[in-house]
């Protein structure tokens, strides 16, 4: 999917522009000094110490970055307790997880905080840039340093290819691909997900991804899907329901 015509790197300051130039070269998109008189709808820029993704609506509000803070209601101790549908689906005895559809990494980071050993795959270069920035910030968090933890390993590429060549199969492969929206706009997920959908599009190869993941995993595949969607891999071994969503678990015998 081509994003080059939709995105630019924005350098509004007057200091050292080298990391902005490096990012625009890496992504092969223009470097702009203002958002006016440009055709792009999206911008990447560093603001308040994080790399942020902006659209014209978010320009004044501050933009979206990968949030490394625990979710509402999550305990701040490490490892956070393995509670709720998500960790039940991943499995309490599971040690290693590959998140093959990392996106904004909210699920990966939740798994990391619960003490799972997490590897992350993402194919969008834009999202990779945001993830790299976030995991660098995570490495500097005092609790991560005190406990001598390393942030999840990030892998760029199509999981359909990367999962075929794994040296160490994980206990669990986690999939959260994008499904077409069926709910009314008001019930749609947050801005972060709508912007992701606009930039990377729908994940139309998710059935193939499931099949490759099931071959590649050592023990299980977990698929998160909206509650209205058909299970991606046929009848699951078990399912756990969350708010408006479902985790389908496929176990290997
Ligand atoms: C719905 S988002 C995932 C959201 C994520 N679970 C979170 O907590 O933020 C799906 C992401 O998976 C990525 N993706 C989908 N299929 C992929 C594939 N075959 N290989 C790598 N990344 C993929 C998309 O680019 C997108 O960023």
Image (spheres, rainbow, N blue to C red):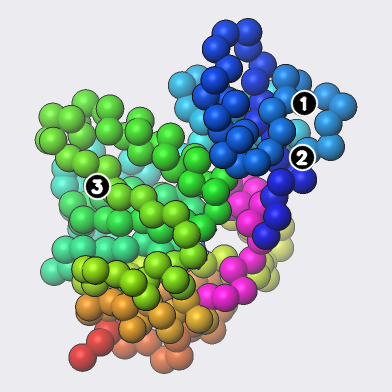
Outermost residue on the top side: it is 14
Q: Secondary structure at mark 1?
A: loop
Whether residue 82 is situated above or below residue 181 in the rendered picture:
above
Q: Are marks 2 and 1 in contact (CB under 8 Å)?
A: no
The residue positioned 65% from the left and 70% from the top of the image is 180
Magenta stretch: dominant secondary structure:
helix
Between the residue at mark 2 and the residue at mark 1, the CA separation in whole angstroms equals 9 Å
Between the residue at mark 2 and the residue at mark 3, the CA separation in whole angstroms equals 34 Å
Task: Determine the image quadrant of residue 144.
Answer: top left
Q: Is mark 3 within 8 Å of ligand 1?
A: no
The residue identified by callout 1 is 35
Q: Position of residue 109 (x, y in %)?
A: 33, 48
Could you tell whether 184 is left or right of 206 in the image? right
Q: Earlier in the sequence, mark 2 or mark 1?
A: 1
The residue identified by callout 2 is 41
Quadrant where the image shows the C terminus: bottom left
Density class for disc 1 (Cα within 10 Å; few <14, some 14-19, many ≥20) is: some
Point out the stretch of residues depicted in magenta: 191-206
Residue 46 in the magenta stretch? The answer is no
Density class for disc 3 (Cα within 10 Å; few <14, some 14-19, many ≥20) is: many
Could you tell whether 132 is left or right of 204 in the image? left
Could you tell whether 167 is left or right of 67 in the image? left
State the mark number for residue 113: 3
Whether residue 171 is situated above or below residue 144 in the rendered picture:
below
Task: Determine the image quadrant of residue 187.
Answer: bottom right
């Amino acid at each position: 999917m081509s994003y080059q015509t939709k995105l630019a790197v924005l350098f509004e300051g007057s200091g050292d522009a080298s990391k902005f130039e490096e990012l625009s070269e890496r992504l092969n998109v223009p470097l702009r000094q203002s958002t006016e008189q440009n055709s792009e709808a999206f911008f990447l820029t560093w603001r308040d110490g994080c790399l942020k993704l902006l659209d014209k609506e978010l320009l004044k509000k501050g933009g979206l970055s990968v949030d490394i803070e625990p979710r509402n209601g999550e305990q701040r101790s490490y490892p956070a307790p393995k509670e709720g549908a998500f960790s039940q689906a991943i499995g309490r005895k599971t040690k290693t997880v590959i998140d093959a559809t990392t996106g904004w990494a909210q699920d990966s980071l939740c798994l990391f905080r619960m003490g799972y050993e997490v590897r992350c795959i993402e194919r969008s270069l834009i999202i990779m840039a945001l993830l790299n920035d976030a995991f660098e910030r995570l490495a500097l968090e005092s609790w991560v340093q005190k406990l001598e933890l390393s942030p999840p390993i990030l892998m760029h590429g199509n999981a359909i290819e990367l999962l075929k060549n794994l040296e160490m199969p994980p206990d669990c492969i986690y999939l959260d691909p994008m499904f077409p929206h069926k709910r009314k706009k008001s019930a749609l997920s947050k801005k972060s997900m709508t912007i992701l959908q606009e930039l990377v599009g729908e994940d139309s190869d998710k059935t193939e991804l499931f099949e490759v993941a099931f071959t590649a995993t050592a023990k299980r595949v977990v698929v998160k899907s909206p509650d209205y969607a058909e299970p991606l891999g046929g009848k699951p071994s078990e399912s756990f329901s969350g708010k408006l969503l479902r985790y389908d678990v496929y176990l290997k015998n």
